[in-house]
Structure formats: C-alpha cells, structure tokens
Image: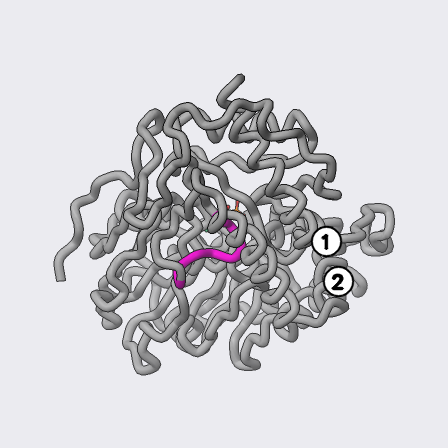
C-alpha cells in the first residue's frame, strides 16, 4: 500500500470555490439579479443558531432550569459521582453502547478524548490514518510530528472520501466519522471488517447522536457534548471496546504520558474513570447541562428521533440546494453528505460566502455559517438534532436574499 503525497488539504484561501462536475449552471454569470429583485424575507428563523460547534442548545433550553445542587460541591461527593455516573449511564442507553464497552468522561473536549486514545493505544502496530478535511488532518499531524509514528496516510481533498477499500486493518486505523469541515462522512461501517487485527479509533464528535454508529466496528469512539446535543465544550467522552482495553493493559507506549492521559495503573485499567471518577476536576455545570440535553434527547424519542431530526433538517436544506442554481454541496457523493455539518459551495468570487454570512449575522438571521477557516470558501450550516426544521426552512429565502445582497455590498 502506498501513502498519498502529504499535500495540504483543500484550496488555499483566496482561490475560487471548487466546482463539482454535477454543479448546476449559474443562471446569469457574474451578473446575477440585483439585490432589489430578491425581497427581504419576512419570516426569520426563530433561532439563528446554525454554528457547527458549539451548536444550538436544545429547543426550550433555559440555563436557569438546570439543577444546581451538585455545584459548589466536590465532584467526588456522593452527589457529584452520582451525576457523573448518570451522564455515563444515560449516554450508554441513548447511544446503545454495548455493555462490555467502557465509557469515560475525560478532560479537554473531543480533542482531549481522541488524543488520549492516540497517546495511550498507539505504537503497538503500524498505523493508517485517513484524512479528508481539517480535523482528520490534525490527527495525522499528531501521529507524524508528535508521536513520530510513520503512518500510512490515505488522503482525499475536501468534498471527497479516501479509498476506504485500501485500508489495511492489520494496522491501527485513525479516522473521523463525520468530517465537520467538509461535510463528508463515511456512509456506514461496512468497510471495517469484524475480524480486524488492529484497532479502529473513530472521532465521532459531529456524528454521535445524529448518525448510527456501529460499535462492533469501532474500538474507540470519541465525542464532545458541544455538538449534536448542544451541550458545552470542556469535556470529552471516550468509549473503549474490550479490545482497546486489552491493548491498554498489554502495551506500554514508548513516549511520556501526562497525568490527564493516564488510563492504566500497574498494568490494569483504572476502572473508576469509567464509573464517574474523573481524572481531574470536571465542570459540574457542564455535567448538569449535558444531563439536561440527554433528558431532552430521550423526551423526543431517543436515538432514532435525533437521527430523524438531523435527516429532516438536511432534507429541507437539500431541497433548497436542488432548486437553487448558484449553490451545490461540497460533498460530491450523495451518500457521503453529512446530515449535521452541511457544507455548501457558492458560485462567484471566493469572498462572497463570507459577505453573505456577515449580512445574515447582522440581520440576526444566521450565526456562524461561514466555512471553516481551513476549508474551501463556502457556507456551513449545522443541521444537527437541536436545530428545528422550521428554522432551516425559514433560513433558505434569507440565503437567496443574502446571495444577491452580497453582490451589491
Ligand atoms: C471532527 C472534529 N474533531 C475534533 C474537533 C475538536 O473538538 P473539540 O473542540 O470539542 O475538542 C471538532 C470540532 O469541531 C471536530 O469537528
């Protein structure tokens, strides 16, 4: 197997947005209709929160409704441990994590959880790293420059997936389930064999609670509360398969491990971490906020309902994309299109989407919908479960308005 050239992903800022072969033809090149021809819509999204992280709070959220009895107390008090344990147990129930998988709450959001897995598990086998957008590329940087592993790197440009059939599962495999900055996700886990020798380390932060995760195919799953459930940053969730635990107990990494990465003591997993005894002090306010989000998730119907909400949001946006000549999906293959971080390419000069995003923010219609800083110019509209479909529907005429208004700006 050969590694692809280590070229940076994506077009540098200032280049025209990529056009896909099926991209629609613009109606009136350069001179699309003047701003005056697209009236300012009347209806605004009730909640203009379309950021891809931190994401919209759940509908009906009220900070003052959070319980406060665990605040100002030790996180190792009876109540502190019970709240942390409840967060773990409810995560297991909602995500249908198998009973023999461990779930831990760890420091430093998704990055902390994923790097903890890399630092503690890698080094025992060759590594293959998949990267098709900025966050996957970040894990490659960790593997190459920090851990000094010599991974096989399978890359694809923004909008594409690498060749999943080329992965050698005798290796440990690093990948991101849903590439938040390109809006490209793996369609399923069928490309991962059940009888793999290596471990699969899956960054699922913008997929968990919106896309089904086949745990039998995944040895490590990480996510942050700030994404699909609209929780807060600060803590990550680290989910480990029995095979990952066996690796932790049998392999001592050759590099130093800071205290906040240590999961093993005397060759044995520190089980307390997976029962709510966090390594260091968590924010109990963030824990209460997460418990609130989990309770909301159960109340709307659990995992299927959350996935259906994201699918409905994506479908509403996709209908508009299909009927709008100047916009297309960055994700080329329909089956790889994210139902959370939906990335769109806009015809016209590269600065146009930024101007659109600024106009919409000034109108109070849409916050934080510009493409990620390292991604090709475009729009990124979060469609995760906490967003209401009516708000996506209300947003679309505003996108039309902004496209025309931005050309006048
Ligand atoms: C795929 C992916 N991985 C990692 C991160 C980093 O997450 P955090 O800031 O929660 O550590 C993000 C954040 O957007 C992400 O989308």
Q: Are marks 1 and 2 in contact (CB under 8 Å)?
A: yes
Residue 344 seen by the camera? yes
Residue placed under numbered mark 1 in the picture: 58
Q: Nearer the viewer, residue 45 or 162?
A: 45
The numbered dot on residue 157 is none
Q: Position of residue 296 (x, y in %)?
A: 75, 62
Residue at the outermost left position: 2
Res. 30 image quadrant: top left
Q: Is residue 113 above or below residue 144?
A: below
The numbered dot on residue 296 is 2
Q: Position of residue 103 (x, y in %)?
A: 57, 68
Q: Position of residue 139 (x, y in %)?
A: 36, 49
Q: Nearer the viewer, residue 165 or 69?
A: 165
Q: Which residues are magenta?
A: 335-342
Label located before the other in sequence (1 or 2): 1
- Say left or right for 168 vs 248: left
- Say left or right for 163 vs 284: left
Q: Residue at x 34, y 53 (%)?
A: 332
Q: Is mark 2 within 8 Å of ligand 1?
A: no
Determine the CA span between mark 1 and mark 2: 7 Å
Q: Residue at x 27, y 50 (%)?
A: 156
Q: Classify mark 1: helix, strand or loop.
A: loop
Q: Is residue 22 above or below residue 221?
A: above
Q: Residues within 10 Å of mark 1 (few under 14, many from 20)?
A: many
Quadrant where the N terminus is found in the figure = bottom left
Asked whether residue 261 is drawn in magenta, I would say: no
Q: How many marks?
A: 2
Q: Residue at x 76, y 68 (%)?
A: 299
Q: Nearer the viewer, residue 314 or 306?
A: 314
């Amino acid at each position: 197997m050969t590694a692809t050239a280590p070229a940076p992903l994506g077009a540098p800022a200032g280049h025209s947005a990529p056009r896909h072969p099926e991209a629609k033809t613009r109606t009136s090149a350069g001179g699309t209709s003047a701003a005056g021809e697209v009236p300012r819509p009347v209806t605004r999204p009730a909640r203009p929160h379309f950021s891809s992280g931190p994401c919209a709070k759940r509908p009906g959220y009220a900070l003052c409704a959070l319980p406060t009895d665990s605040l100002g107390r030790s996180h190792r008090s009876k109540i502190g441990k019970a709240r942390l344990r409840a967060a773990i147990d409810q995560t297991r129930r909602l995500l249908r994590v198998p009973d023999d998988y461990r779930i831990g709450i760890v420091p430093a959001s998704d990055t902390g959880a994923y790097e903890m897995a890399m630092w503690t598990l890698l080094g025992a086998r060759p590594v293959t790293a998949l990267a098709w957008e900025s966050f996957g590329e970040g894990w490659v940087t960790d593997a190459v420059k920090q851990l000094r592993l010599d991974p096989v790197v399978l890359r694809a440009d923004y909008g594409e997936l690498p060749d999943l059939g080329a992965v050698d599962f005798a290796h440990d495999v690093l990948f991101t389930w849903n590439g938040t900055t390109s809006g490209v996700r793996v369609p399923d886990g069928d490309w991962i064999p059940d009888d793999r020798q290596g471990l699969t380390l899956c960054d699922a932060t913008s997929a968990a609670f919106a896309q089904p995760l086949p745990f039998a195919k995944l040895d490590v799953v990480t996510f942050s509360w700030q994404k699909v459930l609209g929780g807060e940053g600060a803590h990550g969730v680290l989910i480990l398969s029995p095979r990952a635990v066996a690796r932790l107990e049998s392999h001592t990494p050759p590099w130093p491990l800071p205290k906040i990465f240590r999961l093993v003591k005397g060759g044995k997993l520190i089980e307390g971490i997976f029962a709510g005894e966090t390594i260091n002090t968590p924010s109990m306010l963030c824990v209460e906020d997460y418990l609130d989000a989990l309770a909301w998730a159960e109340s709307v119907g659990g995992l299927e309902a959350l996935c259906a909400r994201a699918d409905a949001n994506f479908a509403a946006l996709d209908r508009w994309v299909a009927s709008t000549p100047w916009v297309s999906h960055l994700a080329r293959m329909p089956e790889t299109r994210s139902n959370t971080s939906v990335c769109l390419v806009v015809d016209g000069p590269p600065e146009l989407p930024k101007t659109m995003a600024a106009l919409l923010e000034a109108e109070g219609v849409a916050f934080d919908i510009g493409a990620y800083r390292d991604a090709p110019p475009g729009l990124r509209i979060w469609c995760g479960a906490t967003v209401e479909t009516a708000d996506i529907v209300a947003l679309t005429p505003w996108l039309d308005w902004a496209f025309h208004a931005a050309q006048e700006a």
